[in-house]
Image (cartoon, rainbow, N blue to C red):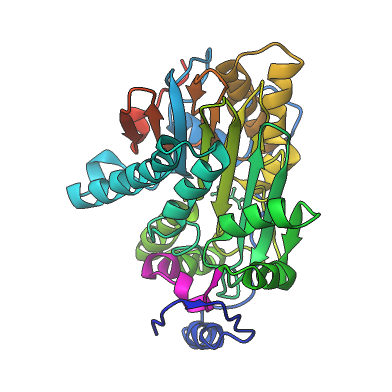
Amino acid sequence: MRTRPRTGKLLSRPWTLPVLAAAAVAAGLLTTVPYGTTGGGRGDGDAPAGPAAGRLAAAGAPQGKARPDARHVVLAVHGGAGTALQRDETSPEREKAYRDGLADAVRAGKKVLDRGGDSVSAVEAAVRSLEDNPLFNAGKGAVFTADAGHELDASIMRGSDLAAGAVAGVRHVRNPISAARLVMEKSPHVLLAGEGADGFAARNGLATVTQDYYWTQARWDALMAAKKKAGGDRSAAGARSSAALADEQAKGTVGAVARDGKRNLAAATSTGGLTNKMSGRIGDSPVVGAGTYAKNGTVAASATGDGEIFLRGAATATISHLMEFGGKDVAAAAYEVLVKRLPKLGGDGGVIALDGRGTFDAPHSSEGMLHAYLTEDGTIVTKIFPDETPPNT
Ligand code: ASP
């Protein structure tokens, strides 16, 4: 089933998708099950509602005052919110693979900054590294839609002039973040979607792939688990292999934030979206102000989590506004949005947020969030287990 990525040639009829779908239909698993909403939230109460409430309680409910994760940070990446890794259940090999993946991405961005590159190039390089890593839900390793396809979203933003570019629902670009950058720099638009975006990327020389390039067994298993869960499999085995797996594998979006030698900020985010999402569904990741935002003077931010909530809460733009108009510092603003406001809408997630002075925070209402950062002295710190991330208390 594996084929090598093809460059420069856009295949309009990937043959693997019908094969995968047919296999699933034969297994009695593939009906078009709309992605369930994350609803249940009231939107106006004081306490988190819906699924977030349970998860927050289980995670020890991050509440209290905000505090920065680190200072003197020049670049940071994330590999998604969620509960993918638990210390007592993760093998040393798996732990190492995740830490290496995050550190490699940081190093890719660092290389750009070290040679005098700008923050936009640094976040693009970091995100490309994560897109090429099958552990993460972006590029290779992207999750499956409800009809067993892959539709990828990405965006990038430059803090110096608020320039931004994004692609949504692309199916053939190997590195969606580079397509987003192309939209920013080579088109008069901000967001291109679907075939038009794939075609634009291919015409501008980006590598294109058939759908099977994105395939991984883990994501396929997660789709099957999600189908079983939606189908109401209540057996003990079903509960273990479906509900838990679907939750664990659902997240894994990637992102990066950076500031360069000229103190310009940039942010980038890339994702396959949510497992079992409806075809055509677009989340927060390609939407400027929701999944990604960068503005010199306030913040570079990249989000991960329940996209519908980040869209409705205008998450990353709100962090910037709270800093610009509310006088909050980066940690207080990010905390306010991620921990206090978004859970009330009925979902969870996290954000990496960096200001122009290098103050960095990674607040999350999900149990954990994989992330890593680079400080001015060249130190790289990776955090993959929930107990490594500050509980915001
Ligand atoms: N925010 C992404 C989306 O909704 C998913 C994620 O970050 O896990 O598409």
Stretch in magenta: 207-221
Which residue is located at x 52 percent, y 30 percent? 260
Looking at the image, residue 200 sits to the left or right of residue 29; the answer is right
Quick check: is 139 in the magenta stretch? Answer: no
Residue 291 showing in the rendered view: no
Q: Nearer the viewer, residue 317 or 11?
A: 11
Which residue is located at x 33 percent, y 29 percent? 387
Picture quarter containing residue 172? Answer: bottom right
Q: Position of residue 201 (x, y in %)?
A: 64, 67
For residue 229, above or below residue 125? below
For residue 224, above or below residue 359? below
In which quadrant of the rendered image does the N terminus lie?
bottom left
Picture quarter containing residue 170? Answer: bottom right
Which residue is located at x 43 percent, y 31 percent? 59
Which residue is located at x 33 percent, y 35 percent? 382
Quick check: is 218 in the magenta stretch? Answer: yes
Residue 288 showing in the rendered view: yes
